[in-house]
Image (cartoon, rainbow, N blue to C red):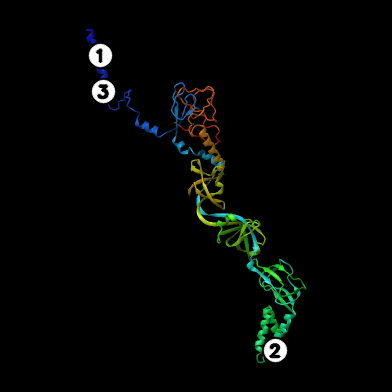
Amino acid sequence: MRSRQFLVSLTALLLGIGGGFLAGRLLPGAPAASGTSPATGPAPGASAAQGTKRVLYWADPMNPQIHADHSMKDSMGMAYIPVYASASAEGKSRGLHIDPRLTQNLGVRLTTAQVRPMGHALHSVGTVQVDQNRIYTITPRFSGWIKRLNVRAVGDAVYRGEVLAEVYSPELYRAQREYLIARQQNSAPGRSALVAATKERLRLFGMPRSAMATLERTGKPLRDLPVLAPESGVVTTLNVRQGGFVSSPSTFYEIANLDRVWVNIAVYSNQLPWVRIGNAVRLHAPAYPGKIWEGRLNFLYPTIDPETRTLTARVSFPNPGDVLRPGMYTNATLLAASHPALAVPSNAVLQTSEGNYAMLAQGQGHFLPVEVALGPEADGWVEVRKGLKAGDKVVESAQFLLYSESQFQSVKARMLGGGAPPKEGALVNTPAGTPQPGPGERQTSPSPGSSVPPSPAATPPSAGAQGGSMPGMNMAPAGAHHD
């Protein structure tokens, strides 16, 4: 009787268990059984989520300052905890982030890389010289004595047609008398040719037309003949004095017209490949700040100065008001082969021992140091041949501060384990109190710059990632943002 009751109870129990199992498998919305077969894996969504994350390193659960580059267990058998990089950290791991509200306080100013006319700018020194095509020499064509000298000093200004001196010449006086006699006898046959010959002789002596008209009008020879200025300018040479004797080999005056002057620019031999006739030239004179003269190179001298080892390039400038004076030094900028090119302000480029860098603004307070290849510089702009594109925003001021902080962040990220993994077999200095790995286990040493707490109390893996950063900087290195 008892055995029958036992069999009935056992049968009912088995039927109840079987019915419950079938109901759990067949009814919709029922929770899955707690036990799964070995072939059953994690949900597809979970595996996809894990697959999109990059493991930065594995941290010791008892001492987060100890990192490893692979999954392992510590000496107590506890598995290391993986630290993942977040999406924002992945995109900005190479740059740095600064609170946009602090950019004004730090003096951060942005500028735009743009395409503009650029050329190889050569800066040199120019010297103002007299235009040699505008120098006039006054030489007598007869002998005589200076009866009156009106212009007596070098540097005096003269005007065209002005009487410079009056000269008494017996030779010229005799030629005038011969002309007057020929005119009086002009009515005789064959005398017209004699009149023309004597008049031509006076003209060849250099007798002015005004003096010739006076001679014909009065019929009396002029004892003192005037010497007129052929052009306006300044006297640069004076070789006579009052009462002196002059003759045809001697020179009275030299007059230079300064309405147009030359500027001779010194060009070094290594700059010659860039210099061409027709290049634009800008002139700045220290005596006239803010005033600019613009012209074009019109001549290159064929020889090099043996003393200065420079070639002289010549530019001609108009000189109204005689502002440019011969002998004056000027600052000359020669623009060679101007062409459109991508350029940024010169002060936006940071020159370091490792190369030239520009701080690229990526928006929302994020900056990235970008290495750039530079070309020629002109007018405060420098050509960028590689590293930037038109429209990029770069930092024009405070870039040294941002670049230094980005370098500090990069070093700190490597110290915290975000850089290259340690080499196999490297010696590890483990602080006192740190659990030692067992046989077959591996452990990496903490970074030289990090401090290991004396007690192995567990802290979050991101602890200590904010130390040493600049105020206002989000200096989160690799490993500071994780799940």
Farthest-out residue, bottom? 189
Residue marked by disc 3: 22
Percent across and percent down for residue 142 are 72, 77
Q: Which of marks 2 and 3 is in front?
A: 2
Label 2 to label 1, Cα distance in Å? 174 Å
Q: Are marks 2 and 1 in contact (CB under 8 Å)?
A: no
Q: Kindly identify the residue that appears in the image at 26 percent across and 23 percent down.
A: 22
Percent across and percent down for residue 274 are 55, 56
Label 2 to label 3, Cα distance in Å? 158 Å
Q: What is the three-letter code of the residue carrying label 1?
A: Leu
Label 3 to label 1, Cα distance in Å? 18 Å
| Residue 319 can be seen, yes or no | no
**Secondary structure category for the residue under label 1:** helix
Percent across and percent down for residue 11 are 24, 15
Q: Say the numbered circle drawn on residue 10.
A: 1
261 in relation to 339, above or below = below
465 in relation to 270, above or below = above
Query: In this image, 230 relative to 393: left or right?
Result: right
Q: Nearer the viewer, mark 2 or mark 1?
A: 2
- Sequence-first disc among 2 and 3: 3
**Secondary structure category for the residue under label 2:** helix
* Quarter where residue 139 is shown: bottom right
Percent across and percent down for residue 303 are 61, 61
| Residue 181 can be seen, yes or no | yes
Residue marked by disc 2: 184
- Sequence-first disc among 2 and 1: 1
